[in-house]
Amino acid sequence: MGGDFGPRCIVPACIDSLAEFPSLRLILVGQAQIIEQLIAEHPAADRSRLLVHPASEVIAMDERPAQALRCKVDSSMRQALELVRSGAAQACVSAGNTGALMALSRYVLKTLPGIDRPAMISAVPTARGRCHLLDLGANVDCTAEHLYQFAVMGAVVAEAQGVPRPRVALLNVGTEDIKGNQQVRLAASLLQQAEALNYIGFVEGDGLYRGEADVVVCDGFVGNVVLKASEGLASMIAARLEALFRSGVRARLVGLLALPLLRRLSGELRPARHNGASFIGLQGIVVKSHGGAGPEGFRAAIGRALAEVGENLPQRLHGRLGQLLR
Amino acid sequence: MGGDFGPRCIVPACIDSLAEFPSLRLILVGQAQIIEQLIAEHPAADRSRLLVHPASEVIAMDERPAQALRCKVDSSMRQALELVRSGAAQACVSAGNTGALMALSRYVLKTLPGIDRPAMISAVPTARGRCHLLDLGANVDCTAEHLYQFAVMGAVVAEAQGVPRPRVALLNVGTEDIKGNQQVRLAASLLQQAEALNYIGFVEGDGLYRGEADVVVCDGFVGNVVLKASEGLASMIAARLEALFRSGVRARLVGLLALPLLRRLSGELRPARHNGASFIGLQGIVVKSHGGAGPEGFRAAIGRALAEVGENLPQRLHGRLGQLLR
């Protein structure tokens, strides 16, 4: 029911996903009448893999998480998470209120032993491949111990996605030991002692995109602002490129020729393709789609959740935490 | 003497700057023999506008600021700032150790009345023009009061550069009142009460590049990481574009045609063109050139300092602070 466009965007995205992923089965949780009407607009949809699970309440995008937790027992978000807890579903995907989704996820699913706070993680494209960045906004204030736990979780995610001995770094304002705030410096000393992790030290903002590390750890304030600023900058550059190739007859001609090449690049960088931040550290899989994502973006988030089911991420994390946490 | 390339980069940049700015007079502060040798390689240099002021010591790029402050009385950095304090120079430009430059600037020049901490500010290109972003790394931990003072200083800088009634915003992880950490929320309530400022609320990372505000305020950790990540992302996109236009015969042909257009774009975005972060809140003008900047970047930093002399920035700030600070 959530996101900037609600079920009008999510239902068609779900139906497309069923066609894209033959092993996928979806349970759409929310106000059944609205959802059924939207499904009815797609008579070719495979109803055998598409259930509707009713939930009467909706959490607003600007609702306080504590309010959502206390007062809305029958919200679509809560009911979807209950399906994961009970085992009726293997993952939850939501485009709704991020703070409420995090609070409800912690309350319903609980964190894994040894993890104080779940984190949001996503991969950004770099000059050398991809880098897993966390936290992306679930925790605006973090202690050194939280940053340490994020590093451990990030390493396990990177391993699960096929990176052997992932290089783990802390995001900082410089690479020298004396740089940064107290939390980051203290987290560095914790990580230096963690022999099971391949901790490589501090990276700066530009090092993130140079691909200096496979996992980059920061607090949720920094991660959220960096990710959104990057999306904003990439969009601005794309718009400038487009304007450039419309700025005269000759430019238009060159632009027509260059267009297929530019589309390939923009496809690689496009946020929708990389949509979906995972909540990790929970006893279950939860993927947050960007509230402003269109159907293509929401489909990408479903794909992310499906991949995590395949990677068996929570169980894998659980198994490694005892070894990696001090 | 500072920066990654030292006087070998800075001296030629200075000589070029004399040709570029006819009103400019430069005092090169540092180890006189090295500097004179480098000047001698440019016999056409206008020596009537180029003085050498000897200073025997050099502050290393990784030296602790406190150490630089206590032990190196005759460092080039310190002596350059003393020239500004005494009025012999109107501005100081350095590519050296940022932390040491900030500590020495505060010690030698002092802050303006009402300003607790100087900040680093620079303008980033946006979809609608430019946005002044601060702090860029001078203060990794900030109180709400510091953020408030940064907002006031940023507004005066934007005004000095011709923006009437600049829109001032706080960088945050969301735009709703409940979002962010305590410092940011408290700074918002201080700014809401400041009638002399055009405070427009929170902006997110993408809003920065969409041009939603003329001045964006954050702590130095966030600002530094955002600015460097943006530089890294822009470089990565530029490299991808270049690779794209080399990926085959047809692509090469299109690339040759598109090259002049792409060069125009990359010129607009290129960090060197926008090099030089200003230290503001001091009783004097100090511009920090990026340590890794080449001659073109250092020339841009000199140009920035010259512009600030024309804008009479410290005096202008002094005049407005009484009105704007609570």
Image (cartoon, coloured by chain):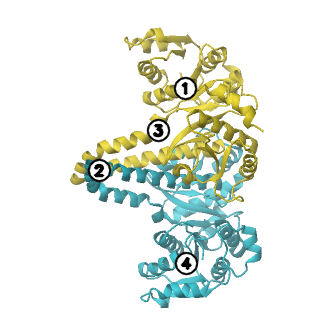
Chain colours: A yellow, B cyan
Spatial CA span between label 4 and label 3: 43 Å
- Toward the top, the furthest residue is A48
Crowd around label 2: few <14 · some 14–19 · many ≥20 (10 Å): many
Disc 2: which residue: A245
Of residues A206 and A42, the one nearer the viewer is A206
Please tell me if label 2 and label 4 are on a single chain.
Answer: no
Can you give x and y, in whole percent of width and height, for residue A252 in the image?
A: 24, 49
Spatial CA span between label 2 and label 1: 38 Å
Which badge, 2 or 1, comes first in the chain's sequence? 2
Crowd around label 4: few <14 · some 14–19 · many ≥20 (10 Å): many
Q: Residue at x 64, y 35 (%)?
A: A156
Disc 1: which residue: A305
- Image mark for residue B260: none
Q: Residue at x 52, y 47 (%)?
A: A229
- Quarter location, residue B107: bottom right
Spatial CA span between label 2 and label 3: 22 Å
- Find out whether the residues at labels 2 and 1 contact each other: C-beta distance under 8 Å: no
Can you give x and y, in whole percent of width and height, for residue B225 in the image?
A: 59, 53
- Find out whether the residues at labels 2 and 3 contact each other: C-beta distance under 8 Å: no
Q: Is residue B152 left or right of residue B241?
A: right
Disc 3: which residue: A271
Can you give x and y, in whole percent of width and height, for residue B283 in the image?
A: 65, 73
Query: Label 3 sits on what residue type?
Result: Pro
- Quarter location, residue B151: bottom right
Of residues B281 and B94, the one nearer the viewer is B94
Disc 4: which residue: B7
Crowd around label 3: few <14 · some 14–19 · many ≥20 (10 Å): many
Spatial CA span between label 2 and label 4: 41 Å
Image position of A47 with respect to B224: above or below = above
Residue B279 visible, this orientation: yes
Query: Label 1 sits on what residue type?
Result: Ala
Please tell me if label 4 and label 3 are on a single chain.
Answer: no
